[in-house]
Amino acid sequence: MSYYEPYSELSDAAREFDRVIQSLIEELDAINLYNQRADVTTDETVRALALHNRNEEIEHAVMLSEWLRRKVPEFDEQMKIYMFTSLPITEVESSATGASGSSGTRDSSGSLGIGSLKK
């Protein structure tokens, strides 16, 4: 683990947070590794094993992400905004907050969200 501040000065909660973040990084790295192995192998059994292992690591990454969601309100807030929606990812925030995005995209009514110019 790499600490940016002296270990002895960190609270138990900060240390636990670091453990989960480091574990999540390791799981994501393993997902990437197994995905690459599955992609390059010519042996179907090796591909199946690599994909099985990748999917196990995905499970672990999701479990760690859920721990973060439950323990860190800011993760919960952002996950509620961005996850489990079919909207384009770059449009999710403006849709959730009702703010007009700068991308110039129109909503379902065809409006650019700039309001009426009529008095």
Image: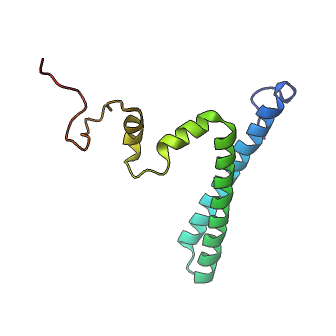
Q: Residue at x 37, y 48 (%)?
A: 87
Kindly indicate the quadrant of the structure image that contains residue 41: bottom right
| Residue 84 percent coordinates (x, y) | 48, 51
Q: Residue furthest front?
A: 119
Q: Residue at x 62, y 66 (%)?
A: 55
Q: Nearer the viewer, residue 76 or 30?
A: 76
**How was this image coloured?**
rainbow
Q: Residue at x 17, y 25 (%)?
A: 116
Residue 77 sits above or below residue 10 on the image: below
Q: Residue furthest top?
A: 119
Which quadrant, please, contains the C terminus? Answer: top left
Which quadrant, please, contains the N terminus? Answer: top right
Instruction: Using residue 87 as the reference point, say whether residue 76 is left or right of it.
Output: right
| Residue 106 percent coordinates (x, y) | 24, 40
Q: Nearer the viewer, residue 107 or 103?
A: 107
Kindly indicate the quadrant of the structure image that contains residue 75: top right
Q: Residue furthest left?
A: 118
Kindly indicate the quadrant of the structure image that contains residue 46: bottom right
Q: Residue at x 81, y 27 (%)?
A: 10
Residue 43 sits above or below residue 113 on the image: below
Instruction: Using residue 111 as the reference point, say whether residue 80 is left or right of it.
Output: right
| Residue 69 percent coordinates (x, y) | 64, 42
Q: Nearer the viewer, residue 1 or 65?
A: 65
> How many numbered discs?
0
| Residue 11 percent coordinates (x, y) | 82, 28
Instruction: Using residue 56 as the reference point, say whether residue 95 is left or right of it.
Output: left
